[in-house]
Image: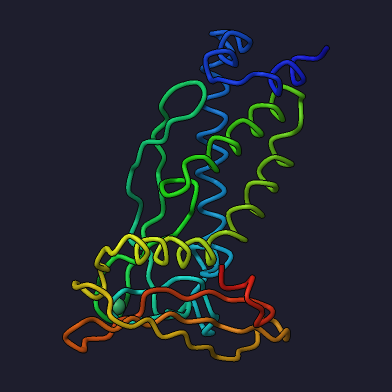
Amino acid sequence: MTVAEDLMRCKTHGEMLKIVEPKGRALLREWKQKLLEEALDHLVEEYYGPRWQKRRHHAPTPWICLECGPRDSSQVKRNSHYRRQLVVLEGVITLRIPQLRCRHCGKAVALAALFLTYRKRYWIDLDREITKLYISGVSYRQVKAMIERQIESDAGLMSLWRRFQARANGASYPGLKEKLKVLYLDEAYIKIKGAPFWSLLALGEGHSGKRAYLGAVQSPDRSETAWV
Ligand SMILES: [Zn+2]
């Protein structure tokens, strides 16, 4: 049985740690840190362009300002990085995460990389998968490409999903600052690289009548699955 197979049979983190040697653990921790930081930077560059390049066109992004609504690439600016900790199988890593700001109101715009907070179970599974790939000798480049695809497909959908979950719990929204009375769903048709895309918007209305954008997501179709 290979180490990778052993790992897949483990039911707890403790069991996995016994397999991964202590010395290898430190290396793996660094490997994951670099992998995730680069994948997050890549996500920003995908929509925003490399740091050295001046933005001339207005490309749609999955980012949304809680005050001003959906932002295109010309409406956000990079605002260095912030640090946050993430628990991985081998301990705690500190990640440098790109910070984005709305050019209009100056508020922080969430990057919405799901594995960092809201879906803990999801992150544990992804972490396990990365560990398995590392131990099986899959190249850094290949794993990074996998993570990037994952983050990208989740970036838009998850920010919306997270907000819907907050609604289910009766929580008030940061953009609205009061409890939600009505949730409007709206859509806009846009083209990305020549392909048609539907931009799905969630607009909330509070008891005082105040409205705020709660989320947006780009989808190649208008089906219900695109919403959840
Ligand atoms: Zn704003």
Q: Where is residue 34 shown, x and y percent of the image?
A: 53, 36
Q: Is residue 219 above or below residue 10?
A: below
Q: Residue furthest left?
A: 208
Residue shown at 74% from the left, 41% from the top: 142
Is 160 in front, or is 32?
Answer: 160
Q: Residue 112 location in percent, x, y?
A: 45, 59
- Residue 165 drawn at (x, y percent): 41, 61
Picture quarter containing residue 137? Answer: top right
170 w.r.t. 64: above or below: above
Q: Is residue 7 left or right of residue 104?
A: right
Q: Which residue sits at x=64%, y=33%?
A: 130
* Closer to the camera in the image, 216 or 51: 216
The quarter of the picture where the C terminus appears is bottom right
Quadrant where ligand 1 appears: bottom left
Residue 178 lies left or right of residue 158; in this view the side is left
Where residue 98 sits, quadrant-wise, is: bottom left
Q: Nearer the viewer, residue 144 or 165?
A: 165
Horizontal placement of 205 versus 123: left or right? Answer: left
Q: Residue furthest right?
A: 1
**Going 73% across and 84% down the picture, which residue do you hit?**
195
Quadrant for residue 109, please give it: bottom left
Could you tell me which quadrant the N terminus lies in?
top right
Tell me: residue 1, above or below residue 134. Answer: above
Number of on-image labels: 0
Please state the horizontal and vertical placement of residue 126, each as a whole percent of the image: 60, 39
Asked which colour scheme the image uses, the reply is rainbow
